[in-house]
Amino acid sequence: MKTIWYNGRIYTLENEGETVEAVVTDEDQIIETGFLSGLQQKYNIERSIDLNGAMMIPGLVDSHMHLIGFGETFLKLNVSGMTSKREILNAIAEKVKTSSSGDWIIGEGWDENLWYDKTPLCKRDLDEAAPQNPVVMKRVCRHVIAVNTLALDAANINKQVQAPVGGVIEREKNGDLSGIFKDEAQNLIFSKMPSITDDYVEKALRLGIENCWKFGLTGVHTEDLSYYETYDRAMTAFLRVLGDRSLPFKAHLLVHHKVVDEWKKDGHRYMSTIGNIEFGAMKIFVDGSLGGRTALLSRPYADDLTTQGMAIHTLSELKELVTKARKYKMPIATHVIGDLAFEYVLDLIEVLPPPNGMRDRLIHAQILRQDLIERAKKLPVEIDIQPGFMASDFPWVMDRVGENNMAFNYAWKTLLESGLHCSGGSDAPIESANPLLGIHAAVTREKPNDSDHNMYMPEQRLSMFETISLYTKGSAFACGHEYNRGMIKSGFAADFTIFNQDLFTVNKDDILKTSVEMTVVDGKIVYQSKKAKALFK
């Protein structure tokens, strides 16, 4: 069905400031852009969408998130944004009131950096809040959990337990367990938690997609296949929800190294598709998080000189994983927050480059050095950044790594000016999936709703064109679709995000007051605001 979209600020993003009067689409493709009268005369238009002055851009795509995990936030105890430990403990106590004795209480989102008392949750806190229920509380970064005594008992863990390779188990001064487990050590608890059902995973996936639409997201790059007890459980959910193209949403699915052999045995390959599922690079975690001081740095943490963070794998193990990816003719997508982790990956890419025509992805890349940027720009790589991390991590991150070491950290302007390709994401559910929060952070380098307008490293601010390009052209480039996604152009996908006001002209204080009026995937309207339902005919 030929549709014409007109009477709005339609930005093609092909060039900065470029707009067109109208766009003609046919099913899932853009046919032509240009002047309204000429297009109306040229084509037999079957449907007309009057944008009523709204802003239309190529569909926003989150280049790094965990889609099922994002959907789970609507099913679990979510303590994200709570500003005190007491508020969180009260929320757990309220959950206890509606739970039976012995039921597991699972929550996520706590962040001690938001509290006046910055001591993390611990076993004693959770024992007080839930004396008759095992409790597992995931930190916002998902690299740290806090558990209570009943959870330890259920997992048969006592004070003699030793941390696995790539994990940390924290202890009190007397040697007792504090209840804090980091990175690979979390699996000691996760492996003993109650089983989840196929229906639960599928429901979480559907909720994730529905709420992405509300944020104007037409697709995501996501990594979910290793977190739900078995590879089959998550894969089955994706196949049920997106495997037949009946649900308009594009999922570029990274494949965790723990399940890549099963995935390969199933007959999949890099960039093969099933319905609206496309398979991407092999995902490898190289280090942990800044919040848990497990991101791997080349120098000790400024606020804890006893540690430089932690490598998830030995160098020989990491080389074996990259070698396996190359054997399977796959690029790699590596979680690298610390500069030493980034360096380890560059070392391997230089000797084990991806197959011709492919590019490796370095995810997060928050702590860098100039020499690493110089090396990276000579390699077939792309950087997945999460602008929203700036708003969450400053100012505490300056104390953590040292103010004198910040010149190339969260340095997005530097990365773009060096010629590196970057894409924009959220890492939801670590952060909100709302791309407007990332856009605001990148353009202003301020925290949301900060009346004092404190700017963090203002020299790294991006223009609105650079920022929106991260979530459109950048995300398309990251998954090899720069030739047919990310711009409003003939032959490109009919994926659009439509806002109620023009982000290129709005005052920066009003960026977060912008609302999504419509989300369009493959020419189909998948979300409309109440106002849009009345206006857009």
Image: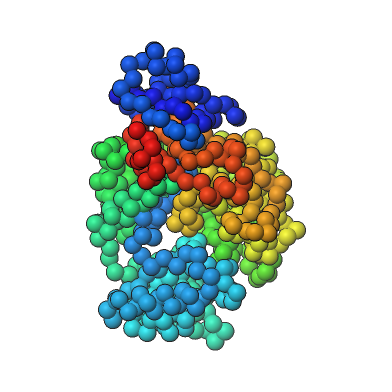
Residue 149's spot in the image, x, y percent?
Answer: 40, 82
Q: Could you tell whether 525 is left or right of 425 in the image?
A: left
Q: In which quarter of the image is the C terminus?
A: top left
- Measuring 68% from the left and 46% from the top, which residue is drawn there? 460
Quarter where residue 204 is shown: bottom left
Residue 76 shows up from this direction = yes
Placement of 216 over or under 150, stated as above or below: above
Residue 359's spot in the image, x, y percent?
Answer: 51, 36
Placement of 417 over or under 119, stated as above or below: above
Q: Could you tell whether 7 is left or right of 507 in the image?
A: left
- Measuring 71% from the left and 62% from the top, which residue is drawn there? 402
Residue 421's spot in the image, x, y percent?
Answer: 58, 37
Q: Could you tell whether 413 is left or right of 274 in the image?
A: right
Q: Looking at the image, which is closer to me, 24 or 415?
A: 24
Placement of 211 over or under 131, stated as above or below: above
Placement of 463 over or under 456, stated as above or below: above
Q: Looking at the image, which is closer to me, 282 or 228?
A: 228
Q: Looking at the image, which is closer to me, 280 or 416?
A: 416
Residue 437's spot in the image, x, y percent?
Answer: 53, 51
Q: In which quarter of the image is the N terminus?
A: top left
